[in-house]
Image: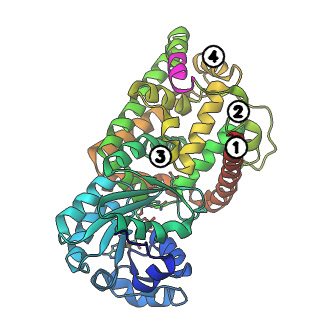
Amino acid sequence: MEHTKPSIKQLQEQKVIGIIGLGDMGCLYARRFSQAGWRVVGCDREDLYETNKTKFANESFELLKNGHLVSRLADYIIYSVEAENINRIVSLYGPSTKIGAIVGGQTSCKGPEIAAFEGHLPSDNKIISLHSLHGPKVNTVGQPLVIVRHRASDEDLYFVEQLVSCLQSKKVLLSAKEHDRITADTQAVTHAAFLSMGTAWSAINQYPWETPRWVGGIENAKANISMRIYSNKWHVYAGLAITNPSAHEQVLMYSQSVSELFTLMISGEEAVLRERLHKAKDFVFHHVDENDLLLDDNILDRYSLSKEPPGGKQPNSHLSLLAIVDSWFRLGIIPYDHIICSTPLFRIFLGVTEYLFCRGNLLDECIKVAVSDTTFRHDDLNFTMASSNWANIISFGNFDLYRREFEKTQEFFKPMLTEANALGNQMIKTILDRVREKEAAADAKIP
Ligand SMILES: NC(=O)C1=CN([C@@H]2O[C@H](COP(=O)(O)OP(=O)(O)OC[C@H]3O[C@@H](n4cnc5c(N)ncnc54)[C@H](OP(=O)(O)O)[C@@H]3O)[C@@H](O)[C@H]2O)C=CC1
Ligand SMILES: O=C(O)C(=O)Cc1ccc(O)cc1
């Protein structure tokens, strides 16, 4: 006999949702679920309970003292804590999980999270994990939301899907392994590129928007995204890259591409460089229509942090963008295959790179500049050293060193981060609106 599925309303009457870790993402979920009519209980660190009572006094969810109390009460518990600590925190509260409850997490790499659940949860508990592929201030509508059903029935999955439906995100069902492979290709290497830009600017003591060398739409996108990353918490990026073994390979390959391309540039090997980059272009962008690119300089021109009106543009060697395509080619990655599971930053990075490689003869102009014009050599040398340093820190798995390097660069940009973030938000909104328009136009064409 077939059972009829309960309605959302019935589920909301029966089920309690628990959130462990009420930081940026945990708080976003707790708010959205409770505002949609679910009973939500949550906790942050027990030693901060008294302070947090005041902080969360006006929220529509209930603050409990610790993860034991959340775990005993809730039917679906989401751990939204630092990736580095997931095993320790699950080992603490996991054994208190209500009989038959479902457990999941929000950390950005699923392998270690699932291993923690398997290691510390009683065997009657189910496992369905989540990953919202966007930051806490991005509108959740239409953004990818990965659901990893690891140990659960169809009814359990149905319940979780009903719960997250209020976010109006795009559901993507993946295994933990698939998720980690894809996010290494997309997120980890994107962050490595923008982290390296920031470190390089800091090393030469130069804000990119204060020099006429860095003028133009592509340069604005680079600076804004780099600032956006440095205005976030270091542990988000460290956890995502260090805990994901596939990410180590990607980031190392990226840094190797940077170093090899830079060597060709300074040796004046224009023909070799051209052949290598065109091969990579043909592999990555073979299907791209030049008249239907995601981005252009005109959109991005509007988002400059510079106080000066834009003057003549100084052509740039764009080492960071040439190297990403080179490394995709060498790893056999077609980034468009992952678009369903991509973050806003990755889509912008891809859009900017696509523009450079597919618009007119921009690529060939860029190769010429890279070999003959020495204006960017100092920047490129520092970028090469920075990308190698980040690859070493990540593959060595050193959280402390990651934090130190991240915070050193963050300190350099501190006076500008608030303004840069506001501008970056506008830029991202414009780009995402444009992506949505393009998708709607493409859907309308399907008979
Ligand atoms: N920020 C983002 O853009 C995204 C982040 N993620 C992932 O989501 C997770 C959460 O990230 P985010 O919200 O940004 O990070 P936050 O640092 O803002 O939130 C984590 C929260 O967990 C708290 N915490 C630590 N230990 C415990 C404990 N024992 N019990 C309860 N709470 C505890 C932390 O407290 P304290 O700070 O005092 O240690 C903090 O408030 C991370 O794994 C991150 O990688 C996923 C998608 C996007
Ligand atoms: O868009 C990005 O790459 C971000 O910087 C925000 C982010 C960070 C961590 C995640 O696991 C998902 C999204």
Residue under label 3, please give it.
Answer: 191
Numbered disc 4: secondary structure: helix
Classify 10 Å Cα crowding around label 2: few (below 14), some (14-19), many (20 and above): few
Q: Position of residue 175 (x, y in %)?
A: 34, 50
Contact (Cβ within 8 Å) of mark 1 with mark 2: yes
Q: Give the range drawn in magenta.
A: 278-286
- Secondary structure predominantly adopted by residues drawn in magenta: helix
Upstream in sequence: badge 3 or badge 4: 3
Residues tagged 1 and 3 counted as in contact (Cβ below 8 A): no
**Which residue is more in the foreground, 386 or 231?**
231
The crowding category of the residue bearing disc 4, from other C-alpha atoms within 10 Å (few below 14, some 14 to 19, many at least 20), is: many
Q: Are marks 2 and 3 in contact (CB under 8 Å)?
A: no
Foreground: 117 or 57? 117
Say which quadrant the N terminus sits in: bottom left
According to the picture, the residue beneath numbered tag 2 turns out to be 292
At horizontal 66% and vertical 51% (from top left) the residue drawn is 432
Q: What is the three-letter code of the residue carrying label 3?
A: His
Query: Label 1 amino acid?
Result: Lys
Disc 1 secondary structure class: helix
Residue behind label 3 places its C-beta within 8 angstroms of ligand 2? yes
Gap between marks 3 and 4, in whole Å?
27 Å
* Quarter assignment of residue 212: top right
Image point (42%, 87%), residue name:
63
Which residue in the structure is indicated by mark 1? 438
- Between 152 and 384, the one lying in front of the other is 152
